[in-house]
Amino acid sequence: MYYRSQSRWQKNRFQAALLALALLLAATLLVSCSNSEGNTEGNTAVPPGGEDEEPGNGEQENPEDPGEEIDYQALGVNEAGRIMILMYHEIGEPEDVWCRTPDNFRKDLETLYEAGYRLISMSDLLDGHIDVPAGCSPVVLTFDDGNAGQFRYIEKDGRQVIDPDCAVGILEEFYAAHPDFGLAATFYIYYDNPFRQQENIQHKLEYLVEKGFEIGNHCYTHGILSRLSPEDARRELALHVKRTKEYLPGYTVRSLALPKGEYPKDMSYVIEGSYEGTAYHNEGILLVGAEPAPSPFTVKYDPAALPRVRASETGVEGYGLYDWLERLSNNPELRYVSDGDPATVVVPEEMAEQIDRLRLGNRTLIPY
Ligand SMILES: [Zn+2]
C-alpha cells in the first residue's frame, strides 16, 4: 500500500516536472521569433502610429547590450527579402473568392503568428520603419471597399458593441491574446457609406485612427481609374481626401488601393494632383496581385506599384496567402527577416547588390 502510494507520488512528481518543462518550452516558443536579444517585447506591443518616432533612432528604443550580438546567420536575417501585403475584401459568410469567413480570418492570423509574422502598418512600410523582433517577418494587412463585415456594430444587451465576427473585432481579440503580433491594418474605403452603417461612419473612422489603423484611398465612388479622363480621375482621388478630412480633420491619406487594380498609362496624376482646391498625394499605390512586395530598401521597390497577396484560398491559382507562406518558407532568400533593429538594414553578403543606397536614408547597411 505504502509502496503503491509512493510510486504514484513519484509518478505525479515526474509528470509535474514534464509538464513544467513542456510549459517552459511552449512559453519560449510563443514569446517571440527569437529572443537572442531578450527584448522582443516592447517592439510591437505599441500599436503602430501610437508613437511619433523617426526612423533611425532605434538605439534609444533598443538599448543594445554590447555583450550580446545577434546571430544573423542563425536567424536567417534578410532585410532585402519580400514583404507580404495581404488583400482582404469582405469578412463574412459564405467563403468565396472575395469573402473570407470570420473563422478563416482567425486561422490566417494564427497561421501568420505561428510562422513568425508580425504586423506593421502601411505607413511603416512607406517610411521604411520596420520594427519587428529579430527573426520575425513583417506583414501588412489591407481591406478594400469598406464592406460591412470589416467593421460592424451590433446591439447586445441594449448596447452597441463591435461585432466579434467582423474584421476589427477579430483583430482586436487576437491582439489582446497576442500583443506581440501588433495591431495594424489599412482600410481602403470609398464613399458614400463606408462599412454600410451610415449613422456610425463618424464614430468608426475616429475609432479606427485612434486604435492605430489607417484609412486609405479607394477612390471617392470606386471609380476605375483606367476608364476615366485625367480630370475625372483627379476628382475621384481628391474628393475621397476631402471627405475623409471632413470626418477626420488633419488626417493625411497616404496610400491608394487601385479599384480593380486598374490604372492608366500615365500615373503622374494618380500619384499626385488636386481638384477644386483639394490636393492628394498617394505615396503608396497598391495593385491587386499576386506576389509579396519588394523590400523598401531594394532597387526593385516601387511604391507606385506595390503588389499584394490575395488572402484567399479560392480562385487564387497558386498565388494566395497559403501558397506564398509555403513558398517563402521553402525559399528563405525570398523572405524578409528582421534583425530586430529598425535603424539597420542587415542583408546576406550576396543580396547586398539589391540594396538601393538612396532608400536607406540614415539607416546603416550591414552585409554579413
Ligand atoms: Zn474595390
Image: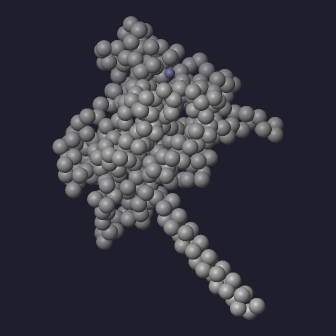
> Quadrant location of residue 368?
bottom left
Furthest residue toward bottom = 2
Residue at image coords 37%, 36%: 292
Residue at image coords 26%, 47%: 362
Furthest residue toward right = 157
Tell me residue 227's x, y (percent): 41, 9
Left or right: 87, with 198 as reference point: left
Looking at this view, is 328 or 149 the one in front? Answer: 328
Tell me residue 294's x, y (percent): 31, 37
Left or right: 325, with 163 as reference point: left
Question: Would residue 246 be visible to someone looking at this image?
Answer: yes
Q: Is residue 338 above or below residue 124?
A: below
Residue at image coords 30%, 50%: 78
Residue at image coords 76%, 91%: 1
Left or right: 251, with 74 as reference point: right
Q: Is residue 262 above or below residue 92?
A: above
Tell me residue 283's x, y (percent): 36, 29
Question: Would residue 171 be visible to someone looking at this image?
Answer: no
Looking at this view, is 228 or 352 the one in front? Answer: 352
Q: Is residue 124 above or below residue 367?
A: above
> Quadrant location of residue 246?
top right
